[in-house]
Amino acid sequence: EREMAHDERLHVHCGMGLGRTTIFIVMHDILRNAAMLSFNDIIERQRKFNPGRSLDNNKDVSYKGRSEFRNERSEFLPLFYEYAKENPKGQPFLWSEWLDHNA
C-alpha cells in the first residue's frame, strides 16, 4: 500500500536528526503535496516547522565532510519533487523507472 490512513503518523529519525531525518520528512511532504504546492513552498514550510533542520543549500556546513551530502541533497530534492508531481501516488512510474525514462 502506498498511502497512509489519515490518522496514521510517520516517525523518522537518524543519528543526529538533521540530515537524513530532514530529507525523509521533506520527501514525505513532497509526495503528499507536490500537486498543490511549489517546491519552494514545501521547503519554506519545512524550514518554518523545523528551523534547526539542514535545508540550506549553502556550502557552509557544521561538520567536516558533510558538504558533499548537502550538495547531493540540494540536487536530489528538486528532482524528486518533479517525479512526485508527474507521478501522483507513484504511478505510472516508480522512482527508478522515472529516472531511467528521464535520463
Image: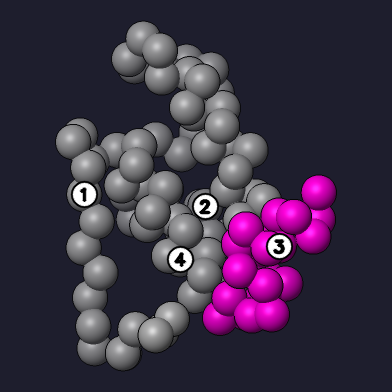
Q: Which residues are magenta?
A: 81-103
Q: Is residue 41 magenta?
A: no
Residue tagged by mark 4?
Answer: 29
| Mark 4 vs mark 2, CA separation in Å | 9 Å
Q: Which mark is residue 13?
A: 1
Q: Nearer the viewer, mark 2 or mark 3?
A: 3
Q: Amino acid at mark 4?
A: Asp
Q: Give the crowd class for mark 4: few <14, some 14-19, many >=20 residues within 10 Å.
A: some
Q: Nearer the viewer, mark 1 or mark 4?
A: 1
Which is nearer the N-term, disc 3 or disc 4?
A: 4
Instruction: Please tell me which residue lies in front, 57 or 95.
Output: 95
In what element is the residue under mark 1?
A: loop
Q: Are the residues at dot 4 and dot 2 in contact (C-beta closer than 8 Å)?
A: no
Which is nearer the N-term, disc 1 or disc 3?
A: 1
| Mark 1 vs mark 3, CA separation in Å | 27 Å
Q: Is residue 54 above or below residue 96?
A: above
Dominant secondary-structure state across the stretch colored magenta = helix
Q: Which mark is residue 43?
A: 2
Question: Which residue extends farthest top?
Answer: 64
Query: Which of the 4 image quadrants contains residue 35?
Result: bottom right
Which is nearer the N-term, disc 1 or disc 4?
A: 1
| Mark 2 vs mark 1, CA separation in Å | 18 Å
Tell me where residue 78 appears, x and y as whole percent.
Answer: 65, 50
Residue tagged by mark 3?
Answer: 98
Which is nearer the N-term, disc 2 or disc 1?
A: 1
Q: Are the residues at dot 2 and dot 1 in contact (C-beta closer than 8 Å)?
A: no
Which is nearer the N-term, disc 4 or disc 2?
A: 4
